[in-house]
Amino acid sequence: MTLEILTLASGSSGNCALVHANDGQERVVIALDCGIAQRNARNLAQDAGFLFTHVDAVLLTHHHGDHSGNIVATAARAKAPLYAHPDAMGHNQKTSAGEVARRQVEVRPIADRLSFSVGPLEITPIRVPHDGDPCFGFVFDLNGQRAAYFTDLGSTDALIGSTLQGVSALVLEFNHDINMLRNGPYPRDLQNRVAGPSGHLSNAQAAGFLAQHAPASLRELGLAHLSRHNNTPELALAAARAGLRQAGLNAVVTQACPILRVARFVATDVAQASPNNKPTLH
C-alpha cells in the first residue's frame, strides 16, 4: 500500500503537486494545483515516474494564479474531474465559466471538512484563512495511512485538534523569515499582507505549531511555499527542526520543497494511523 505526496513546484512563482495512492488493488494519481507551465508539469511528473496528462482527478486549493493558472487545462487534457470550491473559479479567463465549458471540464464542488473519495483515497478539504478565500488544505487517507498538504494560510488554527491525528507525511507552509520580510524589498503594505492573519505562515509560526501540535505519527515533513526574497531553506529547516525537537520528534525526515524540482513525502503505517483510530474531523 502506498500513499505519497510529490511536490513538483513550490513557491510564489508557481505551485503543483501530485498525490499518489495505491491500495494494492486500485491506483490513483491526483494533481494538486497547477500554477506552472504545462510543459514543466509534464516533465517533472515524468521525472517522478508519472504521466501528468493521465491523472485521475485534479484538486484546487484557491484562486490565486500561482495555484490555479493551468488548473482547467490540466483537467481538460487528462479528461479528469476538477474538485474546487465554486467561489474559487472564475477569477480570471483561465478559470472562467466559458473556459470550463469550452474545454468540457466537469467541476465538482468541495466544502470544508466534507470528505469525498477518488478511488480508494478519501480526501478531506480543510478551509484555512488566506486572502485568496476560499482556500483549502487537504488531508488524504488510504486505509489508515494519512498524509496532509497545507500551504497559503495565515494561521494554523484550523489544524489544531484532531485534524492531523495519524498523519505521517505532512507538507506545511514555511513561507518567510519575519526578519527577512521586515528588512526586505517588499513595501510595507505587502509585508503586512504576507505576515497578516490571512497571509502566509512564517517559519516561527509553523515551527511553533509543530512544537505544540505536531502529531506523534509524523515521519516526513516538507517545508513548502518558501519565499525567494524573504526566506532561505537553511532558515526554514533550522526552525522546523527546532520545533520538532520541542515536540520530541527528533527522527522526522525534513526537507525543503524546491521551487521547481520533485520532492517526495511518503506516508507510513503507524499506530495512530490505524483505521480503528481514525479521528472524526470537526
Image: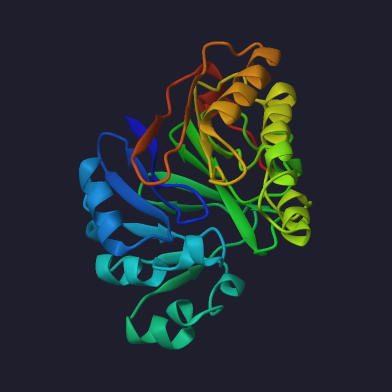
- Counting labels gives 0
With 42 as the anchor, is 187 left or right in this view? right
Q: Residue 35, can we see it?
A: yes
Comparing 203 with 51, the one in front is 203
In the rendered image, the vertical position of residue 154 relative to residue 2, given as above or below: below
| Image point (32%, 81%), residue name | 103
Q: Residue 282, can we see it?
A: no
With 78 as the anchor, is 13 left or right in this view? right
| Image point (39%, 29%), residue name | 266
Q: How is the image coloured?
A: rainbow
x and y percentages locating residue 226 in the rendered image: 55, 42
x and y percentages locating residue 259 in the rendered image: 42, 45
With 36 as the anchor, is 22 left or right in this view? left
With 166 as the anchor, is 93 left or right in this view? left
x and y percentages locating residue 207 in the rendered image: 68, 28
Quadrant, the C terminus: top right
Comparing 45 with 204, the one in front is 204
x and y percentages locating residue 12 in the rendered image: 52, 54
In the rendered image, the vertical position of residue 260 relative to residue 273, given as above or below: below
Quadrant, the N terminus: top left
| Image point (37%, 35%), residue name | 263
